[in-house]
Image (cartoon, helix red, strand yellow):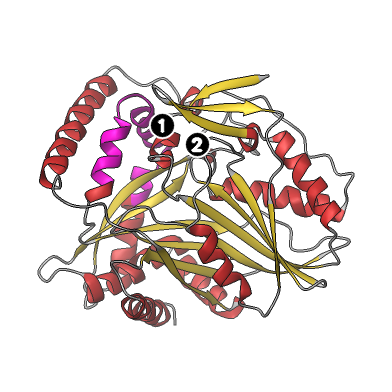
């Protein structure tokens, strides 16, 4: 039996054209003797729990999920471990390999192993899940590998994430209609302006680095002392680096597009749901290094708090679900040159235990996503066992590796200087 479910506006945005890679990855390194049967059985249980892991998409009048119990099992690609960095090349491949949207499943698994140690990496299409979704299934996988009799529960499929959004005032309808008209107009102008341009190739590349537990604790302590979050501190360090390397002279304001976890604002949604439950808020940050770091941090902290209240997040989701025309939004993102803008996604501390009875977690390999837009530049951050992991992703057809390394180095210098 097939269950049909129309893609939400947010899912439709990440679906794009159904051909472009827009993949998300999360990996953990574990020490245990792992058999193929145990891994397959664990993945099968996880797939049975989460409906979107049994889905494919047909795009007729509008893209829809079709959920079926006869969907193929989550495919496993097994790779022989060569060294501690083998996973980097393999993840680069995974980020740039599209999913077959019409066959499914829209998730796959990369297993890199030498017998004693394994890198376990989930890869899914962004239209079905986000960073927290992959954290949920990774936690379930580790529990099942530790004890195959573990119960991971179940939940009923729901129609749309906006079902959990509080009712909005009538004034939001007027605002939504205005946004709809504005986006359609910008999209039309963008399409006309770029009508003679060829499709630009997008290939995701990344830099990955970590802060040691000692360095991470230093950043956390400095942030607490200033009464701001670590996220704010990272925002400013990166804004200064971006202005120095790619900024426009005379325009010190750098627009940061911040990915926000909306689950904590949706009290009725079950916490272990696999879905894309995110939204973005924009913050302008003055990137000039001569300004006092912590004065800017407190200013940005207050602004971000105002923009991410429960009321504001519900309003954003309401607009996403009811008034943002998806095709037009995709068109704008496709041609946006992203001048003076960057994106940061901070997953925070991974909600995954560091110790189990029968397996040992060596480290987190972190979270990252491929970049489908020509001018994308996104920093992904997560923390596990007090070690902060960074991925800086970009389109290698536009930005070169040396530019990104320079930006990373400046950001880390700013971070170290501020948190001494």
Q: In which quarter of the view is residue 273 placed?
A: top right
Horizontal arrangement in the rendering, residue 280 relative to residue 95 (left or right): left
Residue tagged 1:
314
Does residue 33 show up magenta in the picture?
A: no
Q: Which residues are magenta?
A: 304-333
Q: Residue 203: x and y, percent?
A: 39, 62
| Element marked by disc 1 | helix
Q: Earlier in the sequence, mark 1 or mark 2?
A: 2
Q: Which residue is mark 2?
A: 265
Residue at 58% x, 67% y is: 90
Q: Disc number at residue 394?
A: none
Left or right relative to 201: residue 287: left
Task: Please tell me whether residue 3 is drawn above or below residue 52 in the rendered image.
Answer: above
Can see residue 246? yes
Is 305 part of what is drawn in magenta? yes
Pointer 1 with pointer 2, Cβ within 8 A: yes
Residue at x 82%, y 46% (from the top left corner): 41
Query: Residue at 74% of width from left, 31% of height from top?
Result: 154
Q: Nearer the viewer, residue 110 or 332?
A: 110
* x, y percent for residue 231: 44, 61
Q: How many marks?
A: 2
| x and y, in percent, of residue 180 in the image | 23, 28
């Amino acid at each position: 039996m097939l269950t049909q479910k129309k893609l939400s506006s947010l899912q439709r945005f990440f679906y794009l054209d159904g051909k472009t890679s827009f993949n998300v990855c999360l990996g953990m390194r574990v020490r245990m003797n792992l058999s193929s049967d145990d891994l397959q059985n664990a993945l099968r249980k996880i797939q049975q729990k989460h409906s979107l892991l049994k889905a494919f998409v047909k795009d007729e009048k509008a893209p829809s999920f079709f959920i079926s119990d006869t969907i193929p099992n989550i495919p496993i690609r097994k790779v022989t471990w060569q060294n501690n960095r083998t996973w980097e090349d393999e993840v680069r491949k995974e980020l740039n390999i599209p999913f077959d949207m019409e066959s499914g499943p829209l998730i796959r698994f990369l297993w890199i192993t030498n017998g004693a140690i394994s890198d376990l990496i989930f890869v899914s299409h962004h239209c079905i899940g986000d960073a927290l979704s992959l954290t949920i299934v990774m936690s379930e996988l580790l529990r099942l590998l530790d004890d195959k009799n573990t119960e991971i529960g179940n939940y009923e499929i729901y129609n749309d994430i906006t079902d959990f959004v509080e009712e909005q005032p009538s004034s939001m309808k007027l605002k939504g209609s205005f946004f709809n008209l504005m986006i359609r107009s910008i999209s039309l102008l963008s399409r006309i302006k770029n009508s003679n341009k060829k499709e630009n190739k997008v290939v995701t590349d990344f830099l990955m680095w970590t802060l040691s537990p000692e360095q991470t604790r230093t950043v956390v302590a400095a942030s607490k002392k200033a009464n701001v979050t670590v996220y704010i501190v990272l925002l400013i360090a990166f804004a200064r680096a971006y202005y120095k390397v790619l900024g426009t002279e005379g325009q010190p304001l750098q627009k940061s597009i911040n990915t926000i976890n909306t689950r904590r604002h949706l009290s009725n949604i079950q916490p272990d749901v696999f879905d894309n439950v995110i939204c973005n808020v924009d913050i302008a940050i003055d990137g000039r290094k001569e300004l006092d770091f912590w004065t800017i941090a407190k200013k940005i902290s207050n602004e971000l708090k105002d923009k991410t209240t429960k009321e504001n997040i519900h309003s954003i989701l309401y607009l996403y679900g009811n008034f943002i025309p998806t095709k037009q939004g995709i068109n704008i993102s496709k041609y946006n040159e992203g001048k003076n803008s960057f994106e940061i996604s901070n997953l925070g501390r991974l909600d995954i235990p560091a110790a189990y009875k029968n397996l040992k977690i060596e480290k987190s390999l972190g979270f990252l996503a491929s970049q489908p837009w020509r001018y994308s530049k996104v920093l992904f951050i997560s923390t596990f066992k007090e070690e902060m992991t960074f991925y800086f992703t970009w389109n290698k057809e536009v930005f070169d590796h040396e530019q990104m390394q320079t930006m990373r180095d400046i950001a880390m210098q700013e971070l170290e200087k501020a948190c001494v």
